[in-house]
Each structure stands twice: as structure tokens, then as C-alpha cells.
Amino acid sequence: MSDKLEPPPGAVVTDLRVAHLTKAVTHKGEIRFELHVPENDSAPELAEILRQDLILKMSHVPGQRFGPISVDEDERDPSKITIVYKPDRVRNPRADMGEIVRILEETAIPITQPVHEGIEHAFDALQALDAPGHAGAEATRRSAKKGSRGRGSPGG
């Protein structure tokens, strides 16, 4: 009996082919989610799948002309996709957050606990930035920071 046992491999590589959410930036009434797509996957193909799923599966709100989501591939970086969520006043961002997370999970994009917390933080920031009076308070804060620049005035 010559049962030669092969030694176990030194390393095992598993091709996960999974895009990852890398960043969420909240600015001027919108959230920009950035996804990194592995080299062995097709960013345009994934972008099209996301576009279809996010646009078609997000609930429609009566009186809304366009959906709140756009999906674009980065022209300069073929491994990057940007999802922009820009709600209008008739949408409920909290309900949309749940739908976005569900749709991304269905698209096999891993939503770990830290990623989920990051998404919640981005929606909290969106809500805080859209709070009444925020723009005025921000403008006041910025102008107070600069101070007056006239001659003989303090700070100028």
C-alpha cells in the first residue's frame, strides 16, 4: 500500500469578488457612498446592477419626479463606484436608509456592524445638516470666524 499523503497547501486563496463600501460623505443635502471594486470584478457591471436594484427597488414617493439615487463609475479610477443619495423633502431618509442597506446586502456587498454604524452616522449627519436654521447658523459661525477685515478693527 503506497498511500502517499500530499502535504497541506501553504496558502489558500479564496476569490471573494466582493465590492466594499469605503466611505460615506455627507455634504449639501446628499450622501456620497464610495465603493471599492476588486480588480477581478467589473465596476461597470456592478454599477449597472446597483443602478437597477437601487432605482427600481427603492419605494416610490408620490409627487417625486426623480428617484433619490444615482450610481456612477469613476472615470479616473476603474475600481471605484459612487452612489449618491439626495432626498427631496417628501422622502423619509430613515426609511430610505433601511432600504439602501437591504438592497446593498442583496447585491452581496458586505454590511458589517461598523459599516452599518457608518451608514447610520452619515444619515444622522444628513439630518443634522438639513435641520432648520443650520445654514444660517453655519454662515454666522463662518463669518464670525473670519472677523471684520477693516483697518483698525480688532482681528483685522
Image (cartoon, rainbow, N blue to C red):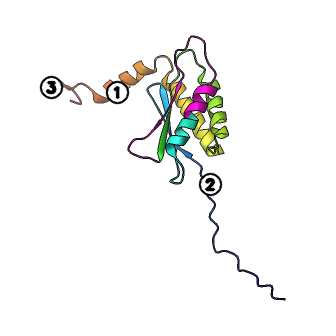
Marks 3 and 2: CB-CB under 8 Å? Answer: no
Is any atom of residue 133 visible in this view? Answer: yes
Residue 91, position as x, y percentages in the image: 58, 18
Q: Quadrant of residue 139?
A: top left
SS of the residue under disc 2: loop
Q: Quadrant of residue 140?
A: top left
Instruction: Name the residue: 40% across, 24% down.
Output: 138
SS of the residue under disc 3: loop
Residue 40, position as x, y percentages in the image: 53, 54
Residue 26, position as x, y percentages in the image: 48, 32
Of label 3 and label 2, which has the lower sequence position? 2
Instruction: Name the residue: 15% across, 25% down.
Output: 151
Whether the magenta-drawn stretch holds residue 139 is answered as no
Q: Is residue 148 above or below residue 19?
A: above
Instruction: Name the residue: 50% across, 22% down.
Output: 130
Which kind of residue does numbered mark 1 sit on? Arg
Q: What residue would you read off at disc 1?
A: 142
Depth-wise, is mark 3 or mark 2 nearer the camera? 2
In the current view of this chain or complex, which residue is farthest to the front?
A: 1
- Residue numbers of the magenta segment: 51-78
Is any atom of residue 36 visible in this view? Answer: no
Question: Is the residue marked by circle 1 packed among few (<14), some (14-19), or many (20+) residues within 10 Å?
Answer: few
What is the C-alpha distance between the residues marked 3 and 2? 64 Å
Decide if residue 31 is on the left or right side of residue 54.
left
What is the C-alpha distance between the residues marked 1 and 2? 46 Å
Of label 1 and label 2, which has the lower sequence position? 2
- The one of 142 and 92 positioned closer to us in this rendering: 92
Instruction: Name the residue: 65% across, 29% down.
Output: 99
SS of the residue under disc 1: helix
Q: What residue would you read off at disc 2?
A: 16
Q: What residue would you read off at disc 3?
A: 151
